Amino acid sequence: MLNMWRRINVDRVSGAFGRSAFPGMDHGYYVYIDEAGDDGIGKPRDIGQPGQSHWLVLSALIVSAENDMHLPAWRDEITARMPRKGNRGVDRSIHFADMNHDQRVWACTVVAGKPVGIVSVLSNKKMLIGHRKEDLFRQKNHLYKYLLRYIMERVTWSCKQRDLREARPCRPAKIIFSRRGGMDYDGFSEYMRHLKALQQKNGSHFPFFWEYLDIEAIEVLEHKKRAGLQLADVAASAFHRAVEPNVFGQYETRYAEVLRSRVIKRRGACLNAGVKPVPPLIEMALDDAQRRFFESWGATEASV
């Protein structure tokens, strides 16, 4: 099958919260969202010590409705090469944090070979300390919801580009979140409606196609319940480990590199499309390794 998002650089051209906003219409896409890191601000951990993560990464895995049914089989391709543990015969779910290095590379390799699109938003939380909106970002779940805006912009744009290429009518996306502790998902639909009103009033730097987002059909599920959420965890964790220092102060960029072919592009570059840094790179203090990582996705020396 044609890889849905490999050439996504065209640039000119009952849920948990009620009924679908598109009654009688099937969803054309399923979008699975997970995160890596935490949203705490103010006490970033020292290298090798416990504490808050330096980065929060949100990732979306986009799959067409036609391929959504294949996600469990794709997940099982990953587990088939891993030793069975405990109740693996009953619970086939995977979690990136439980894998060793070789298994993580394999998981990313499997995902990279499938017709999916990946969007990752990487927030450098250290740069939010002293920010004019720091008090706002410190509020429970505010940073998470703030980053979701960037996810949704890029998801809707990506889905629209595919439908344009294939001369299809608008087919909205269904959003499925991996449940995280303390998150007020009940208010998310209202937040998106508020965001829609603001965006329509003030505009957006990145195209946002609201007709591709079914706000009222959002679902929140446990990680182990859907293979798509487990593959979204692979993406989020891969990008988080590329920028978050480990106990030795080093980064592992290989996982994200393996996923490169799945990351959506705009005007030929992944940066600011499928790889979105927050705040903008020009406002970040990066070490040399982090600088090289972002440059590899399309940054220029002047913008980092």
Image: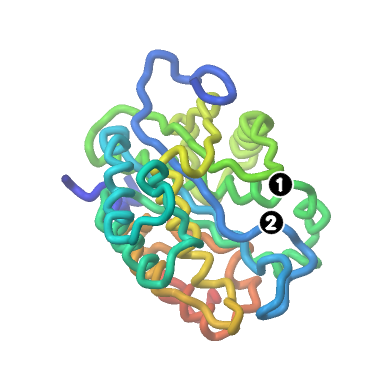
Task: From this view, report whether residue 231 is shown above or below residue 288.
Answer: above
Residue found at x 48% / y 32%: 213
Q: Secondary structure at mark 2?
A: loop
> In which quadrant of the rendered image does the C terminus lie?
bottom right
Comparing 102 with 294, the one in front is: 102
Q: Residue 162 falls in which quadrant of the image?
A: top left
Question: Compared with residue 15, is residue 281 higher up or lower down, i.e. above or below?
Answer: below
Looking at marks 2 and 1 on the same chain, the residue that comes earlier in the sequence is marked by 2
Three-letter code for the amino acid on which mark 1 is drawn: Asn
Residue depicted at 41% across the width and 67% down the height: 256
Q: Foreground residue, 75 or 38?
A: 75
Which of the 4 image quarters holds residue 72? top left
Residue at (33, 54) in percent of width and height: 79
The answer for how far apart the CA atoms under marks 2 and 1 are is: 7 Å
Q: Which residue is mark 1?
A: 141
For disc 2, the marked residue is 39
Q: Residues at badges 2 and 1 in contact (C-beta under 8 Å)?
A: yes
Q: Position of residue 215 (x, y in %)?
A: 54, 29
Callout 1 secondary element: loop
Residue 7 in view of the camera: no
Q: Is residue 185 left or right of residue 215?
A: right
- Residue 274: percent from the left, percent from the top? 43, 57
Number of other residues with Cα within 10 Å of mark 1, as a class: few under 14, some 14 to 19, many 20 or more: some
Q: Which residue occupies the extreme top position in the image?
A: 24
Q: Amino acid at mark 2?
A: Asp
Where is residue 264? Give x, y as percent.
Answer: 37, 55
Can you say whether 45 is above or below 212 in the image? below
Residue at x-position 51% and y-position 78%: 251
Pointer 2 local density, CA inside 10 Å: few below 14, some 14–19, many at least 20: many
